Image (cartoon, helix red, strand yellow):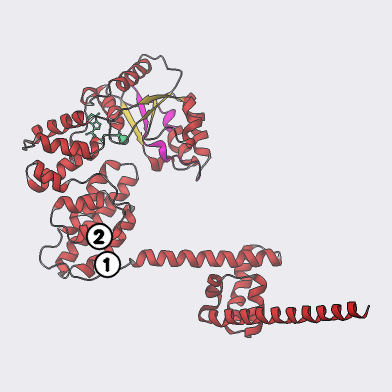
Amino acid sequence: MPWVIKYRPKKVDDVVNQEEAKSTVLTWIHSWLEGKRPTKKALLLYGPPGVGKTSLVESIASEYDLELLELNASDYRRTQDIRKTVAVASQKKPLFKKMIIILMDEVDGLSPRSDAGGIEELMKIIPNSINPIILTANDPWKDSLRPLREYVTMVQFKQLTTNQIIAVLQNICNKEKIQCDREALKFIAEKSLGDVRGAINDLEAVAEGYGRVTFNIVSLVVKPREKNIDLWRTLNSVFYAREFWQARKAVNTSEEDYETLMAWINDNIPAKYEDPEDVFRAWDSLARASIFLKRAKSGNWFLLPYIFDLIGPGVSFARKNGQVLRNRFSYPAKIKEMAQLKSVRENREGVARTIAKRIHASKRIVKSEVLPYLFLMMKYGDINRVSKLSSYYSFTEDQLRYLAGSRVKEIISSINREASNVKETKSAESSKHAAKKKRRSRSK
Ligand SMILES: Nc1ncnc2c1ncn2[C@@H]1O[C@H](COP(=O)(O)OP(=O)(O)O)[C@@H](O)[C@H]1O
Ligand SMILES: [Mg+2]
């Protein structure tokens, strides 16, 4: 079990150095428990990542024996989802426990761009909730959250200092019975920029890779926390990893979403591994990751660290017999196909829209009754007519390629020829006209 999960605070006291936040939240929870519903039915816990926001809520639930209904970003991406999950949860009565706490983690994701109704929906739900609702966010000052701020009590979480983080790490070292130098812990804590989660992950990576945590190792291995945006670097680290933690970190810090990353790794396994048994083990690991990911997406996000391990180290250490082949990484077929499908769909829609507008018919009719003939015309029809038709509808080059296939070049050059003819005749006409005018004015 990853240490960030294993050493998650289980009691309120385990959450260190958020005393102010703790007392606000506890007072609020107590008044719920005493049956005096506070005027604000929701709290918004905010602060940088990895400072204990989620941990505090979880530890309160476990210490007070309350039911915790954890909702995740995927539960409230759209207004409909909010109605389905949050609204229902807000009216739910506890079955076995005294009370339900609703936790909406990381509401920063509530995006007004993709869905303006979401926030409004929440503003309707919160005042009427019969259960305490706790929201968390990294940045509560975002414009999208502004209207919400009146409906919640804001609770700030502070970034932990280096010394506080060292204390958390030291505690873990003691429990794991590993030798940890203070200088090393200090290095990790400083590099974590206040993110306890990140610091614990780094500590675990080093401890696991080297069995001890010394300044020499740590200063070589632990880099400032940054996202790895380079896909090739991620792939290299997975396929060429020598240590478990290298492969895990590669996946952990990748900017790509898990599905894309899995598609890349999936397609490159047979190109990189020569031994069939290695290939089998690697694919087996990815298959498990994909099953776990489905579960994670249905709300069990605590599975994510395991998924990372299956995608990264699971694939790296599947290789037991052969070596890594020096082939270049290839673009995954699945992503290529999807991109092509998408462009076909877009072109089809675009062409249908243009024609529908001109002939006053619906897009559906155009697709079923016009497009089949248009394809034939564009492919086999007389080139002059085809080019006239194309310029009449101003099809784009992509649309022409979609309609006429390999004939697209011929059509485009015909359109260009036509256009320059028109220009020439026009300019010829206008110069004739000018000459006439001149003559006329001279005769006057
Ligand atoms: N104040 C804290 N006290 C003790 N451990 C903490 C604290 N903040 C974070 N952690 C550790 O970091 C991990 C992530 O914390 P979490 O509560 O999920 O952070 P947040 O929700 O603020 O991003 C926890 O599992 C815990 O081990
Ligand atoms: Mg959190």
Picture coordinates of residue 371 (x, y %)? 60, 72
Instruction: Please tell me which residue is depicted at 23% across the width and 40% down the height of the picture.
Output: 198
328 or 421, nearer to the observer: 421
Residue under numbered circle 1: 329
With 229 as the anchor, is 15 left or right in this view?
Answer: left
The secondary structure type at the circle numbered 1 is loop
Instruction: Assign the C terminus to one quadrant of the image.
Output: bottom right
Q: Image quadrant of residue 21?
A: top left
Of mark 2 and mark 1, the one earlier in the sequence is: 2
With 386 as the anchor, is 235 left or right in this view?
Answer: left
Q: Residues within 10 Å of mark 2 (few under 14, many from 20)?
A: many
With 74 as the anchor, is 249 left or right in this view?
Answer: left
Which region of the structure is painted magenta?
88-113
Q: Residues within 10 Å of mark 1 (few under 14, many from 20)?
A: some
Residue 235 is tagged as: 2
Q: How far apart are marks 2 and 1 (CA)?
A: 8 Å
Q: Image quadrant of residue 184?
A: top left
Q: As displayed, is residue 232 above or below residue 400? A: above
